[in-house]
Image: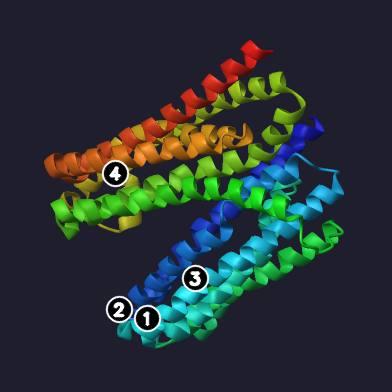
Amino acid sequence: MTVYKKRIIDNFISLSVVQGLSLLFPLIVFPYLVRILGVEGFGLFSLIQAVIMYADLLVSFGFGLSATKAIARNVGKDLHTNNVISAVFFIKIILFVIPIVLFLLSCLFVPMLRHQFIYLLIASLYLLGNILFPDWYFQGIQKMRSITVVTFISKCISFLLIIFFVKKSDDIVMAVFAVSIGNFIAGLIGFFLLLKSFSWKFNLAPKRFVMAFFKESAYVFSSIILVPLYSTINLFILQYFTNPLMVGYYAISEKIYSALSMLTSVANRTFYPHLTQLFKTSQTGFENNVKKLSVYFAAGFTVIAVAQFFGAEFIVRFLSGKHNIQDVNYAVDILRIMSIAVMFSPFGSFYFQLLIIQGRKKTAVRNISSVVLINMITAATLAYFFQGKGMAINLCIIVFFIALFNYYSYQHKSGVNKIQQ
């Protein structure tokens, strides 16, 4: 087995473990928190988590792609790598101030939020962990085992703190602290691993370099933030045209679909750094690898889609805990419809990343923006006429169009390159 294949397999396994931990942690912890905190307390905890997750997206700012690309393309160029690291930390610190200021202003001027100030203050530790943890660096140098080790340690710390210190319904502060401090410690460990791996010297990178890097990351961030945004909007659209029960059926199926689709993230993050390097060194090798990966994705996710279709009833029953077939049949039908989306799910993000590698950030943003506009029309129409099943059909349409637009954009650019060559 070649060194390249060993590295790819090692990175794939490492990222699979990280994704598995991300799925396993809430499955174990959340039922415990619901039982201890109660429905109302868990609702407040979940609301704080949702706020922090959106703030986390802002602080991350698309560096998982832009910084990874910059590191991967310049392995061995210490000055450039040093500038990238300095620029990322500098921009993250500036972005961190934005949600903190918004938290303070909200608590000062919105009476109902004043009592939540302590929760948001503690939760800001989670964001500090994000600033410190250089997962983008380890992806760029293709040493993703470090990410796995750090993630495992952080999840264990949060889990133990929750089990030992969250004992009654008013322990919401401790629950928020447990999750936040776990991520903060992960950031500290990751930061020290970075210093051990690379002789980083903090200096303000050239202003032009920082601005160019910020602009590139902003395009990536714009594309990334639109995906969870339209998914959230769809739930409100379904709520408007139907009822909470229908939203619940759809939400159960969408969570299952999202969990299976996370395999896409693992595969894309595994191959992204390698394809970034290959694009710079060998255009032919890059295109051949893209073709092979496209075939592998098509075959692999078709198998997953078939398994989801025929195993939909078992999956819904197992995860929802319901045994009355009249209660779960509708959710099963929705999940079966979503099987079609599973087949196309890897290609939207895969070709999106290829556009980023090609330096075509504006095209990537334009594609996802177009799909969001299409979604506003199709989601409302299909939810009105077909309710939850209509929204599942809408998901298939949107996933297909994202894949189609990005694929067409990638192929068009590749065709131009061949003509020029």
- What colour scheme governs how the chains and residues are painted in the rendered image of this protein? rainbow
Q: Amino acid at mark 1?
A: Leu
Label 2 sits on residue: 40
Query: What label does residue 99 carry, if any?
Result: 3
In what element is the residue under mark 3? helix
- Judging depth in this view, the residue of 143 and 326 nearest the camera is 143
Q: Tell me the quarter of the image containing the N terminus.
A: top right
Q: Depth-wise, is mark 2 or mark 1 nearer the camera?
A: 2
Q: Amino acid at mark 4?
A: Glu
Pointer 3 with pointer 1, Cβ within 8 A: no
Q: CA distance from mark 3 to mark 2?
A: 25 Å
- Judging depth in this view, the residue of 242 and 303 nearest the camera is 242
Q: Residues within 10 Å of mark 2 (few under 14, many from 20)?
A: few
Q: Residues within 10 Å of mark 3 (few under 14, many from 20)?
A: many
Label 4 sits on residue: 313
Q: Give the number of callouts.
A: 4
Q: CA distance from mark 2 to mark 4?
A: 30 Å
**Residue at point 65%, 37% (across, down):** 271
In what element is the residue under mark 4? helix
Closer to the N terminus: mark 3 or mark 2? 2
Closer to the N terminus: mark 1 or mark 4? 1
Pointer 3 with pointer 4, Cβ within 8 A: no
Q: Depth-wise, is mark 3 or mark 4 nearer the camera?
A: 3
Closer to the N terminus: mark 2 or mark 4? 2
